[in-house]
């Protein structure tokens, strides 16, 4: 396994979660079948590249590692993985513009006083 920035011991908690709530855990685990399926209109390689971008956005190191490995197995190149990651970074950064606009709007609508949106 490559160097990583998360603790593999955290994965032991997943086994415990599976024991504590097996039906719900297996349903959650089954969601990966949406990404990993072979017979969709979107080829598996692109499904995994999308999953990499989402993993970057959600900042899930476990998902990123799993989907990078699956993308490689599906034929993705290093360049494609980097581009998918940078697309995610660009879109995430763009979202900050929405928050900045929303913050300015809330400030203006409260006559210059700070107030959280409810």
Image (spheres, rainbow, N blue to C red):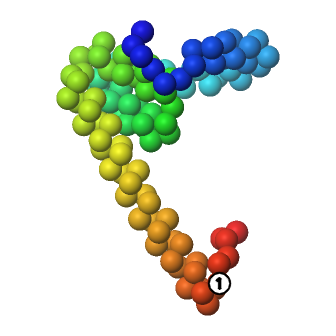
Q: Where is residue 20 in the image (x, y as percent from the top left)?
A: 79, 16
Q: Is residue 76 left or right of residue 89?
A: left
Please tell me in which quadrant of the rendered image residue 118 appears. bottom right
Closest to the observer: 90 or 39?
A: 90
The quadrant in which the N terminus is found is top left
Name the residue: 49% across, 25% down.
5
6 horizontally vs 10: left or right: left
Residue 64 screen position, x and y as percent = 43, 26
Q: Position of residue 110 (x, y in %)?
A: 63, 85
Toward the viewer: 70 or 41? 70
Q: Is residue 4 above or below residue 109?
A: above
Look at mark 1 in the image and give the residue it sits on.
113
The local secondary structure at tag 1 comes to loop
| Residue 44 place in picture, x, y as percent | 32, 22
Say if residue 23 shows up in the picture: no
Local crowd size for mark 1, using a 10 Å CA cut-off: few (<14), some (14–19), many (≥20): few
* View extreme (top): residue: 1
Residue at position x 63%, y 14% in the image: 9
What number of labels is visible? 1
Q: In this view, does 72 lie to the left or right of 56?
A: left
Residue at (36, 51) in percent of width and height: 91
Q: Can residue 98 be seen in this view?
A: yes
Q: Residue at x 26, y 33 (%)?
A: 82
Whether 100 is drawn above or below 88: the answer is below
């Amino acid at each position: 396994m490559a160097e990583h920035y998360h603790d593999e011991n955290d994965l032991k908690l997943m086994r415990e979660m599976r024991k504590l709530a097996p039906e719900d855990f297996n349903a959650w685990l089954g969601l990966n079948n949406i990404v990993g399926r072979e017979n969709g209109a979107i080829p598996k390689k692109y499904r995994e590249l999308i999953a990499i971008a989402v993993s970057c956005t959600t900042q899930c190191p476990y998902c990123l590692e799993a989907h990078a490995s699956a993308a490689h197995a599906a034929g993705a190149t290093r360049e494609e993985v980097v581009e998918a990651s940078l697309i995610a970074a660009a879109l995430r950064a763009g979202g900050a513009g929405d928050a900045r606009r929303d913050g300015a709007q809330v400030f203006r609508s409260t006559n210059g006083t700070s107030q959280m949106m409810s």
